[in-house]
Each structure stands twice: as structure tokens, then as C-alpha cells.
Image (cartoon, helix red, strand yellow):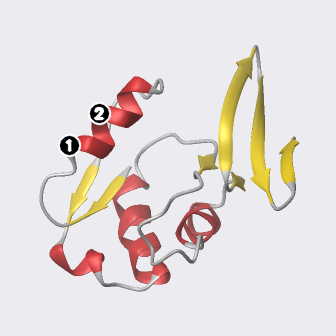
Amino acid sequence: MLGGPGPRVAGAARGAGEGADRAIHVEDDGLATADPSAVAGALASAMRDEAFDLVLTGLQSDDQGSAQTGVMLAALLGIPSATIVMEVDVQAQEVHVKRELEGGGSSA
């Protein structure tokens, strides 16, 4: 899921390289300077008809570094989230993530 102005080809290509089945781009010039709540709302509106179970966000963000957009997005969709995800391992019906925390990594 990508949000913001203009082409986000690099982000979509990176996601595909990391295993994403597809990308959805909410193209809106206003999202580049919007607060995390507005961005999460725009993304949630675009995702309502999709069947997502989980929101995972990485270390780097375009939300002015607040790391809040993913958490707010998950809350709006009523699904769990994990932030600062560095690695994802899907095993049968379980998802294991490695998160980056101050002082080192953590698995959950």
C-alpha cells in the first residue's frame, strides 16, 4: 500500500521484491504533507474492500518519521499491526516478525 503524490514505482518494486503480491497506490498530492491520521484515513478508505489480516510497517517511513501511520491504519481497519519490522517469516497459519528496537532486535 502506497500513498502520496506522483509515481511511487520504487516503493512498489521494493515491495514486489520482498514478496508482495500486488501494490495499491493512493495517488494524492496532499498526502505528502498530511499528518499520519489523514494518511491512515486515506489508505483505510482504499483498503476497506480488501481482505487484509495484518498491517506490517518497516523502519523507514514517509510520515515525517512519526511511525504512526501504520498503527492508525490498523486501528481504523480493526486489525493487528507490528511496527519497525525488519524480517517476516510465514509458517503455515503463523507469522513471525523480527523487529528493530533500541539496543537490538526482537522477535515476536
The residue closer to the viewer here, 10 or 36, is 10
Q: How many circles with numbers are drawn on the protein? A: 2
The residue furthest left is 6
**Which residue in the structure is indicated by mark 1?**
9
The kind of residue on which mark 1 rests is Val
Quarter of the view holding residue 35: bottom left
Q: Are dots 2 and 1 in contact, CB under 8 Å? A: yes
Rendering coords of residue 99 (x, y %) = 76, 47
Helix, strand or loop status at disc 2 = helix
The residue closer to the viewer here, 100 or 23, is 100
Rendering coords of residue 58 (x, y %) = 58, 51
Position of the C terminus, as image quadrant, is top right
The residue closer to the viewer here, 31 or 65, is 65
Image side of residue 4 versus residue 16, left or right: left
Residue at figure coordinates x 39%, y 25% from the top left: 17
Residue at figure coordinates x 57%, y 77% from the top left: 66
Q: Is residue 100 above or below residue 63?
A: above
Rendering coords of residue 13 (x, y %) = 29, 33
Rendering coords of residue 79 (x, y %) = 67, 54
The residue furthest top is 92
Helix, strand or loop status at disc 1 = helix
Tell me the distance, in whole angstroms, between the alpha carbons under discs 2 and 1: 6 Å
The kind of residue on which mark 2 rests is Ala
Residue at figure coordinates x 40%, y 35% from the top left: 15
Query: Callout 1: 10 Å neighbours few (<14), some, many (20+)?
Result: few
Residue at figure coordinates x 12%, y 60% from the top left: 6
Evaluate whether residue 76 shows in this view: yes
Q: Of the numbered discs in the image, which one, if any, rests on residue 13?
A: 2
Query: Callout 2: 10 Å neighbours few (<14), some, many (20+)?
Result: few
The residue furthest front is 103
Evaluate whether residue 21 shows in this view: no
Q: Is residue 34 above or below residue 53?
A: below
